[in-house]
Amino acid sequence: MHSTTTLLLALPLALATAVWPVGPPRPDVLRGWEPPPGPYAAGHRGIDLAAPPGTPVHAPAAGTVTFAGPVGGQGVLVLTLTGGGAPPLRTTYVPVDPLLRPGTTVRPGDLLARVSPGGHCTRPCLHWGLLRGDTYLNPLRLLGTGPSRLLPLHGAPD
């Protein structure tokens, strides 16, 4: 089993320059990615982007729509990314009104859906997730952003 860190670093460079799924302007991140300590533990398996109902949702990268429909009473769209490695990377969007059918291929920036009312946020939002297999990842990694980590300098002058 790969560690989450290994999977994060394994994102293909072509996907590390994806586009935001909503905006411009760049949306506010209402809640960030909070990986759970285990597969059944509490956490936040994606990020919440400020987006009122009706906001267009765009493909962050090239891919194929692999699911578009209701789950638990809310609209969901799943996009399997092209060139995302094995197992493939998938992005998820909820709550949405999908505008495309499964099997549709898209390019970065293509319209996928519109944000619909509902969701788990305290104000209107789009929940954006990223998975490789069954492992949830931080979708901000697709944008080349996300949490920074300072590493020690070895051999640096005093």
Image (cartoon, helix red, strand yellow):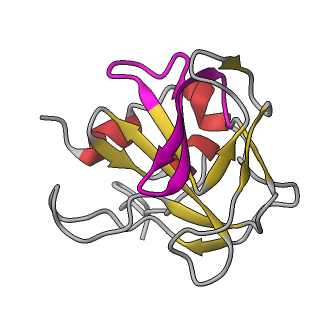
Residue that sits furthest to the right in the current view: 25
Residue at 28% over, 43% down = 135
Where's residue 88, x and y in %? 40, 23
Residue that sits furthest to the front in the current view: 73
Residue at 60% over, 53% down = 145
Residue at 44% over, 30% down = 89
Residue 13 located left or right of residue 133: right
Q: How many marks?
A: 0
Residue 56 located left or right of residue 70: right
Q: What quarter of the picture does the N terminus occupy?
A: top left
Q: Nearer the viewer, residue 39 or 113?
A: 113
Where's residue 52, x and y in %? 77, 68
Which quadrant holds residue 59? top right
Overall secondary structure of the magenta section: strand
Q: In the image, which residues are magenta?
A: 60-89
Where's residue 68, x and y in %? 56, 35
Residue 96 located left or right of residue 66: right
88 falls in the magenta region:
yes
Q: Say above or below: 91 vs 66.
A: below
Q: Nearer the viewer, residue 41 or 144?
A: 41
